């Protein structure tokens, strides 16, 4: 497995691979790898000749310095896991290489980023869109892999790719969970045993929503209120948002007609967790 730090070198390698007719797949990550990341890598490996994983804790998408500082890092462990998952090339640029002095070009996706994560984390999606656009022009992938865990992010990236005619196919993969339902997240390592128990309320509330929809409930607000009650029963939990919305526009819904997205962000102690469910699946 090769490790490349320099964007220019990565671009040269990508050019060479493309000239040789190789299909390139990219899995963008911020490291602290878990089985969710690995599921993207396995899919990437099965669909491409060369699998590239980027590893970059993107400061631009953190709206709080403390969150960036607390973000888990494990370079050595990540490289081992990536290699075992069959990654051919790790692109791990420095902050200086990605945002050198004088850098002043950003990508903003407008409507899709107004609500939910965009509202609670101002500037977050500008950071995400900018870094993903840069990763695509540096790694030149034919396909890039994202997780449904960050549902709004995947939509934002898909919109950006369409709007900018970026020549890459976006593949979105299902949420990988622990056996008890907790969605895997790099941030989970920051949870104490007690907090991890409280964090199960996120999945419990989504399971409740699914059960209510299946039972014929069409009042979205009533379901969201039920979800809130489930989560607020946990003294360690503090809700940022819980919503039932249109799966493409992310506009909130009062009534459930077709497929809907339930999405939520909840603080458990000092750790902010997100989760979602498309219902019906
Ligand atoms: P991150 O390192 O948190 O930026 O995540 C890198 C990619 O892995 C993103 O596309 C995430 O949506 C995806 N991802 C994170 N957690 C999971 C999960 N539990 N299941 C599937 N994909 C995930």
Image: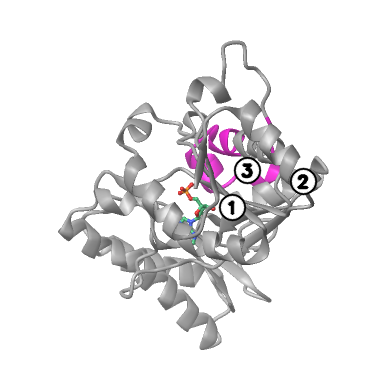
Of the image marks 1 and 2, the number of the one nearer the N terminus: 2
Q: Position of residue 72 (x, y in %)?
A: 32, 42
User: Does the magenta segment cover residue 261?
Assistant: no
Secondary element at tag 1: helix
Relative to 78, does residue 246 appear above or below in the rendering?
Answer: below
Q: Which residues are magenta?
A: 107-128
Residue wearing tag 2:
18
Q: Is label 2 or label 3 in front?
A: 2
> In the image shown, does 58 or 116 lie closer to the viewer?
58
Who's the residue at 52% across and 30% down the image?
5
- Answer whether residue 110 is visible to the viewer in this image: no
Where's residue 201, x and y in %?
Answer: 31, 66
Task: Confirm or deny contact between disc 1 and disc 3 (CB under 8 A).
Answer: yes
**Residue corresponding to mark 1:** 152
Label 3 packing within 10 angstroms: few (<14), some (14-19), many (20+)? many
Closer to the camera in the image, 32 or 87: 87
For label 3, the SS is: helix
Residue 272 falls left or right of residue 156: left
Q: Is residue 164 left or right of residue 246?
A: right
* Circle on res. 113: 3
């Amino acid at each position: 497995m090769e490790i490349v730090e320099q964007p220019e070198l990565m671009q040269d390698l990508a050019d060479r691979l493309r000239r040789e007719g190789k299909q390139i797949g990219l899995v963008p990550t911020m490291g602290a790898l878990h089985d969710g990341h690995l599921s993207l890598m396995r899919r990437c490996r099965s669909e491409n000749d060369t699998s590239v994983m980027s590893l970059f804790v993107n400061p631009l998408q953190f709206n709080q310095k403390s969150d960036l500082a607390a973000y888990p890092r494990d370079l050595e462990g990540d490289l081992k896991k990536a290699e075992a998952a069959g990654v051919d090339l790790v692109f791990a640029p420095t902050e200086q290489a990605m945002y050198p002095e004088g850098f002043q070009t950003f990508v903003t996706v407008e409507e899709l980023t107004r609500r939910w994560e965009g509202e609670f984390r101002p500037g977050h999606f500008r950071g995400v869109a900018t870094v993903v656009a840069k990763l695509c022009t540096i790694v030149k992938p034919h396909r890039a892999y994202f997780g449904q865990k960050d549902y709004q992010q995947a939509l934002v990236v898909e919109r950006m790719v369409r709007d900018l005619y970026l020549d890459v196919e976006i593949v979105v993969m299902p949420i990988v969970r622990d056996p008890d339902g907790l969605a895997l997240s790099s941030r989970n390592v920051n949870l104490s045993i007690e907090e991890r128990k409280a964090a199960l309320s996120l999945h419990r509330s989504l399971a409740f929503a699914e059960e209510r929809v299946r039972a014929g409930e069409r009042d979205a607000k009533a379901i969201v209120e039920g979800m809130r009650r489930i989560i607020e029963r946990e003294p360690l939990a503090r809700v940022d948002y819980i919503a039932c919305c249109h799966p493409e526009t992310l506009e909130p819904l009062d009534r459930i007609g077709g497929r809907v997205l339930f999405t939520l962000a909840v603080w458990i102690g000092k750790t902010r967790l997100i989760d979602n469910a498309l219902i019906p699946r």
